[in-house]
Amino acid sequence: MSKKKKAEENAGYDEPVAPVEPEIVDKPEEISEIDILKDQLLRQSAEYDNYRKRTARERIEMTPEITAKIVTEFLPVIDNIERALQAECSDENYKKGIEMIYSSFMGTLSQLGVEEIVEEDFDPAVHQAVQHVEHDGLESGKVAQVFQKGYKIGNKIIRFAMVAIVK
């Protein structure tokens, strides 16, 4: 091969090549996109935190409602146990067993915050008047007799007390 041909072939290699400039990326756009993503992440985190707090608060608010619903289902059982206590029984051990069951049941209800409604003056907010009676020993507006006990949790009435009131 001749020197002339070699020089023509290597002609492209011998010449100095200008350095390739990297493409300049628009930095403000890149930073603003990162800022946007950070903002979205912060918003998502705040939204999740608010969701967690809201569900915890709702759970706390619903606890008395759920307790009241469950206790309402057990109130007829309490009524039947009270009737069993009032019934005549010759077996003292049986009667004592019923009393123990009743006191255990009432202790459990007390731990749940359930209270019996005990008011001598008629209050339509907690009593349901089913009968008016005349009574010499009590003044008008007093509860003369309780037919069915009422129960409440805090200020929430679970069951109104059914009473007879004095005219």
Image (cartoon, rainbow, N blue to C red):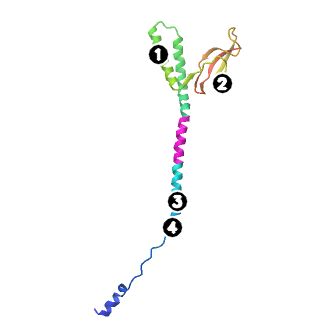
- Indicate which disc residue 100 carries: 1
Q: Amino acid at mark 2?
A: Ala
Give the residue at mark 2: 125
Residue 144 drawn at (x, y percent) = 65, 13
Q: Amino acid at mark 3?
A: Asp
Q: Quadrant of the N terminus?
A: bottom left
Label 2 – label 4 distance at C-alpha: 70 Å
Of label 1 and label 4, which has the lower sequence position? Answer: 4
Residue 81 drawn at (x, y percent) = 51, 16
Label 3 – label 2 distance at C-alpha: 58 Å
Of label 3 and label 2, which has the lower sequence position? Answer: 3
Of label 1 and label 2, which has the lower sequence position? Answer: 1
Of label 3 and label 1, which has the lower sequence position? Answer: 3
SS for callout 4: helix
**Point 56% across, 22% down: residue:** 115
- Indicate which disc residue 27 carries: 4
**Point 52% across, 39% down: residue:** 56
SS for callout 2: loop
Dot 3 and dot 2 residues touching (CB under 8 Å)? no
Q: Quadrant of the C terminus?
A: top right
| Front residue of 132 and 138 | 138
Label 1 – label 2 distance at C-alpha: 32 Å
SS for callout 1: helix
| Front residue of 43 and 164 | 43
Query: Badge 4: how crowded within 10 Å, few (<14), some, or many (20+)?
Result: few
Q: Quadrant of residue 139?
A: top right
**Magenta region: which residues?**
47-61
Residue 62 drawn at (x, y percent) = 55, 34
Of label 2 and label 4, which has the lower sequence position? Answer: 4
Disc number lying in front (3 or 2): 3
